[in-house]
Amino acid sequence: MNVNDVTKNEGNSGYTDFNFTITLSDFPIDAVTLRYWVQSESAVAGSDFVPVPGTVNVTFNPGVKAKTFTVKVKGDRVRELNERFFFNLAGVSSNAYFGKYQGKGTILNDD
């Protein structure tokens, strides 16, 4: 199981979708469950991106190999350094394992 990194310009207004895709190495025969949460690094939840409340439970039903989840990044006209946050995975069920369990969201300043 892996999650991708996303690097995009923040935009000057509105929101930019940062789409994180969790991909299993094969189609599951049994349901696979896990949790994800979004963690601030230099990007601040609330001002740089829309916070994801707490930890979110996810289930991959048999035959489903990938799921995409969106973090909304807020655009602005502020000159600042590039900022980063993390899309973390944990608590996978016993019938799967992690390869890459942390996706990096890099917000490129475009002002």
Image (tube, rainbow, N blue to C red):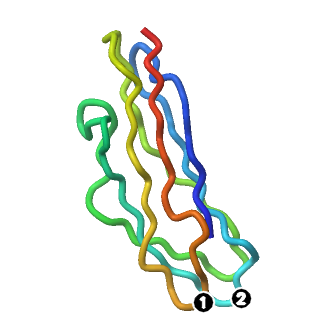
Q: Which marked residue is nearer to the observer: mark 1 or mark 2?
A: 1
- Residue ID at (39%, 21%): 75
Q: Where is residue 74 in the image (x, y as percent from the top left)?
A: 36, 27
Give the CA distance from mark 1 to mark 2: 9 Å
Report helix, strand or loop for mark 1: loop
Marks 2 and 1: in contact by CB < 8 Å? yes
Is 100 on the left-hand or right-hand side of 84?
right
| Quadrant housing residue 78 | top left
Q: Nearer the viewer, residue 53 or 102?
A: 102
Query: Which quadrant of the rendered structure holds the N terminus?
Result: bottom right
**Which amino acid is tagged 1?**
Asn
Residue 53's quadrant in the figure?
Answer: bottom left
- Crowding at dot 1, Cα within 10 Å, few <14 / some 14-19 / many 20+, comes out as few
Mark closest to the chain's N terminus, 1 or 2: 2
Q: Which of 57 and 36 is in front in this view?
A: 36
- Rendered residue at 45%/66% (across/down): 89
Q: Which of 51 and 78 is in front in this view?
A: 78
1, above or below 78, in the image: below
- Foreground pick, 91 / 11: 91
Q: Name the residue under label 1.
A: 95
Q: Position of residue 28 (x, y in %)?
A: 70, 82
Q: Residues within 10 Å of mark 2 (few under 14, many from 20)?
A: few
Label 2 element class: loop
Name the residue carrying label 2. 29
Relative vertical location of residue 99 with respect to residue 19 in this rendering, above or below = below
Dot label at residue 1: none
Instruction: Estimate the x, y position of residue 10 in percent, counting from the top left.
Output: 45, 23
Relative to 64, is 86 on the left or the right?
Answer: left
Q: Residue at x 38, y 31 (%)?
A: 83
Q: Give amino acid for label 2.
A: Ile
